[in-house]
Image (tube, rainbow, N blue to C red):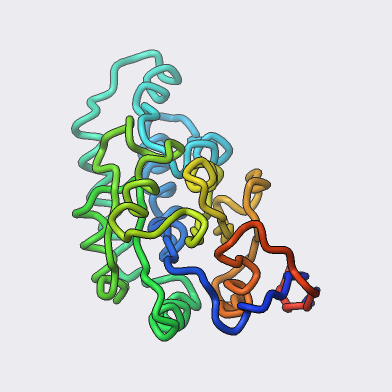
């Protein structure tokens, strides 16, 4: 059942002043998280322990958490980390090989392009991972910039560095950009960079605290992008003249 989400209408609703839309990759443009979780869970089970879904959800969108150290604490013994990680990589390839973009993503990106708005990927993943799976999902073309942590925790979300770098590469001020994210870490990074943010969680992140988001949708398919961008006038000092109901499911 659908219920209305009330968005402000401004004079610029039909001609948005937003100049850039920034997208997280994993979990936002495509959703590998359940399969990545499954690949790691299988290794934990072989050691006689369960990988907690709550723990996994709490570290989604971050880098630097030592999962194998956690397994070693559970087992009380050393783990051959290189062998375990290699097995996870092989299993991930099996599970992710047929995965495509999230429902509605291609239509959304076509609308961004039709509006003449620049788009960027901002991700904690490596550039090689993004390139491989963006191509697999048919999502590799059309990006003005791709900013990724490439394993550097100092630049990774929830730090704002990647978003700041994306804005600089695009030549767009923060108030003329909107970010799409699926996790608390990503939301925090975008907001710390001064960017308004739309949360579109997946099944792993839907129960997490996404309260920092300016708006939330449960699916990319629900988005009426021109109306949404009209809710974010480029000048944050402007006040809406009226309100309109845009349907979204809850």
- Residue 130 locus on image (x, y percent): 27, 58
Measuring 58% from the left and 38% from the top, which residue is drawn there?
54
Give the total number of marks visible in the rendering. Answer: 0
Q: Seen in the image, is 98 located left or right of residue 90? A: right
Say which quadrant the C terminus sits in: bottom right
Q: Nearer the viewer, residue 73 or 216?
A: 216
- Residue 220 locus on image (x, y percent): 54, 72
Q: Is residue 43 above or below residue 197?
A: above
Residue that lies at the very extreme toward the top in this rendered image: 76
Q: Seen in the image, is 47 located left or right of residue 148? A: right
- Residue 169 locus on image (x, y percent): 28, 56
- Location of residue 156 (image quadrant): top left
Measuring 29% from the left and 42% from the top, which residue is drawn there?
149
Residue 35 visible in the displayed image: yes
- Residue 99 locus on image (x, y percent): 36, 69
Q: Nearer the viewer, residue 52 or 187?
A: 187
């Amino acid at each position: 059942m659908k219920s209305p989400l009330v968005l402000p209408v401004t004079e610029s609703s039909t001609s948005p002043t937003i100049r850039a839309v920034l997208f997280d990759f994993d979990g936002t443009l495509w959703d590998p998280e359940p399969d990545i979780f499954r690949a790691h869970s299988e290794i934990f089970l072989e050691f006689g322990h369960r990988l907690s879904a709550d723990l996994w959800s709490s570290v989604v969108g971050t880098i630097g958490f030592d999962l194998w150290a956690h397994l070693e604490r559970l087992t009380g013994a050393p783990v051959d980390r290189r062998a375990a990680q290699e097995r996870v990589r092989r299993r991930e390839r099996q599970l992710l090989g047929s995965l495509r973009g999230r429902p509605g993503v291609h239509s959304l990106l076509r609308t961004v392009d039709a509006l003449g708005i620049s788009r960027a990927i901002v991700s904690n993943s490596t550039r090689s991972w993004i390139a491989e799976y963006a191509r697999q999902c048919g999502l590799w073309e059309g990006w003005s910039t791709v900013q990724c942590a490439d394993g550097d925790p100092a630049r990774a979300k929830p730090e704002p560095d990647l978003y700041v770098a994306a804005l600089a590469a695009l030549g767009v001020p923060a108030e003329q950009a909107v970010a799409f994210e699926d996790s608390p870490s990503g939301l925090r990074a975008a907001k710390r960079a001064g960017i308004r943010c739309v949360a579109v969680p997946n099944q792993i992140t839907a129960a997490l605290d996404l309260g920092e988001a300016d708006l939330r949708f449960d699916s990319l398919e629900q988005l009426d992008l021109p109306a949404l961008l009209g809710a974010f006038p480029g000048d944050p000092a402007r006040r809406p003249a009226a309100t309109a109901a845009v349907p979204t499911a809850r």
